[in-house]
Image: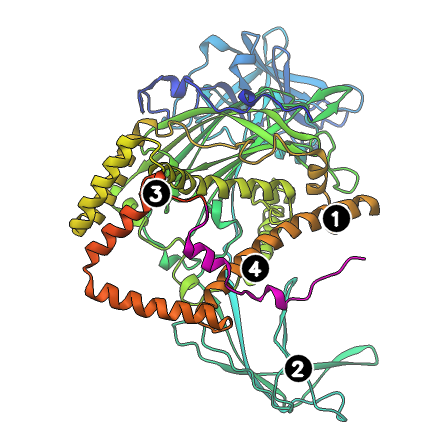
Amino acid sequence: MQRPPQEDFSLKETKPHLGGGKVSGDKLTSTYELVEQMQYLYVRVVKAKDLPGKDVMGSLDPYVEFRLGNYRGTTRHFEKKSNPEWSQIFAFSKDRIQASVLEVNVKDKDVVKDDFVGRVMFDLNEIPKRVPPDSPLAPQWYRLEDRNGNKVKGELMLAVWMGTQADEAFPESWHSDAATVSGADALANTRSKVYLSPKLWYLRVNVIEAQDLIPGDRSRFPEVYVKAILGNQASRTKVSTSKTINPIYIDRRLDHRPINSRWYNLEKHIIVEGEKKEIKFASRIHMRLYLEGGYHVLNESTHYSSDLRPTAKQLWKSSIGVLELGILNAQGLSPMKTKDGRAATDAYCVAKYGQKWVRTRTVIDSFAPKWNEQCTWEVFDPCTVITIGVFDNCHLHGGDKGGGGARDSRIGKVRIRLSTLETDRVYTHSYPLLVLQPTGVKKMGEIHLAVRFTCSSLLNMMQMYSQPLLPKMHYIYHLSISQLDNLRHQATQIVSMRLSRAEPPLRKEIVEYMLDVGSHMWSMRRSKANVFRIMGVLSGLIAIGKWFDQICNWKNPITTVLIHILFLILVLYPELILPTIFLYLFLIGVWYYRWRPRHPPHMDTRLSCADTAHPDELDEEFDTFPTSRPPDTVRIRYDRLRSIAGRIQTVVGDMATQGERLQSLLSWRDPRATALFVIFCLIAAIALYVTHFQVVALVTGFYVLRHPRFRHKLPSVPVNFFRRLPARTDCMLRTVYC
């Protein structure tokens, strides 16, 4: 597979014209914050009165039509109403306006041809400008005119002004670029919206005992267990060890607060003549049920979680700062669908941090959409991550028809860790949108973002680094890994279901992509990437080992002599050891400050092994669970997995062998080796008791650092002795292949 050029996947720093002012250092010279100003012509049509009838019966089905060059927009129409009220707002992008006059027509909807009622004309040069926080422009009554400019019966209440996307009317406006969208529901799918995740709690059910149960089969001892069902979640206890009709379930209290237990009567229903009736009997169950507010309900991975607060609001600490995100634009987006025989993309963004989800408006039919929308979050922990995803809207132009099978396509996403950002600095970068496909990694375009993390209290933020990552209940009464995985899956299902019921909906495929549902599945590519990450972590220790080997072999005599002198000083003055170590670490940190990262991190294809992954590995990663591939393909992959697992098995076995050899030093499994080791320990104890520790340290150090002419190529005596110690590998059964 051809490897794409690495430079195409790089992060690019930009210098946009933010807020009508330029970025000056790390501060803005304008108060308009983190987006570029976009000028819009706003038209707010409120109502009309005294409209003349146009039908034979004297009735009128009025609506308002706006004409501005090639743009045309219409309000909804009313049946037989001469005093209609619309209260609709329209926004026309100033960059696309190619006319000097705004024409507002009132028409009567008809079957054959709509009748003209009257109009109002506006010269764009005379329209007032409004900049928040100015008060909204009050609508006024305008007398309708005919096509010749003569006054006619009827008046229209309007407000027309020039503004920006900061106007409070912007989110609810009908935008001119959505003129081709058909249907009110589809139009609602193009608007920007803010969503809040539902407040989730853990429900703990502590089953203690039951009394007077009635077994269905009296010929054997009952095997009783309790099954609890909440929505689509189900859990059950183990079978009671008490083989009676009064089983006891003993469990520890899982909360520091005193929670009282209660007895609950069991209900049983039967069907009698088609009716459901309750049978009264004396069986009871003893339980504790309570909501856990001290836990954080995980719906994201803790490695890139955006919120770590407990559920109960009274346990929240004060915020430490504010995160501001400006979603500017995108460039070079890939075509995601065909529309009228041509490629098209209807892109929108979703940003998620904490419980707040922000969705931008959909820019219709553009490979370089401009959003210029800004959103703000409170920050409670700097070690959190914000996620920004770009999607293609597939629910326009009748996309919801056919049983609702349309799914919004994902274009890519970006993660930014707040702890990697300097406070009060504006980061403006163009991030590559990378998506892993069965054919390999693909760049779907670039998204232009402006980010600023403002800290309100530096002391509180520094204190956060000494606090536990999760609320204390996770450590006092911890949940098992399997419980957390199951609860996280249920939490993501609840969040996706609730947000998909909003208007406009934030659909399930969007929520699951943003929350990385299914990221725990096996992937050969990710496994290799994790191995390389471990090697990268250990590379420092390996480099130190190689450097020490060079010192011992006198590759650089001057350095070796200096190390001897330093070693002699540390042995004679041991109180300098720890200060020397920490001073060395301090100097390394100060030295590396010159090469500190200047940009926030982004998706790294080399770290992910995405640019070198084999096509078969990618096909395996995109396989469903359970597999849907042919048996021959599955057999090949299974054999490959067995080969890799065999190597891992060998490494784990070697590690176990070394540990068992250590145990055999005193286990007398090899009586001669243990006797030698015990005698050596006695002699060493006497020698170390009568010899000063500094003398022992000097002798040992100089022996290790001795010149190569005093060394032998054969292994040393301790190594030879250790390798001869017995392990339990000879007691394991082996497979014999014939």
Task: Note whether residue 391 is visible.
Answer: no
Q: Position of residue 408 (x, y in %)?
A: 67, 36
The residue located at (74%, 91%) in the rendering is 220
Marks 3 and 4: in contact by CB < 8 Å? no
Q: Mark 3 sits on what residue?
A: 710
> What amino acid is at disc 3?
Phe
Q: Spatial distance from mark 1 to mark 3, Cα to Cα?
A: 50 Å
Q: Is residue 676 magenta?
A: no
Q: Specify the color scheme.
A: rainbow
Q: Position of residue 301 (x, y in %)?
A: 52, 49
- Is disc 4 surrounded by few (<14), some (14 to 19) or many (20+) residues within 10 Å? some
Q: Position of residue 311 (x, y in %)?
A: 44, 58
Left/right placement of residue 162 relative to residue 622 reads left
Q: Nearer the viewer, mark 1 or mark 4?
A: 1
Q: Mark 4 sits on what residue?
A: 487
Q: Mark 1 sits on what residue?
A: 639
Q: Spatial distance from mark 1 to mark 4, Cα to Cα?
A: 34 Å
Marks 4 and 1: in contact by CB < 8 Å? no
**Of callouts 3 and 2, which one flags the residue occurring earlier in the amino acid sequence?**
2
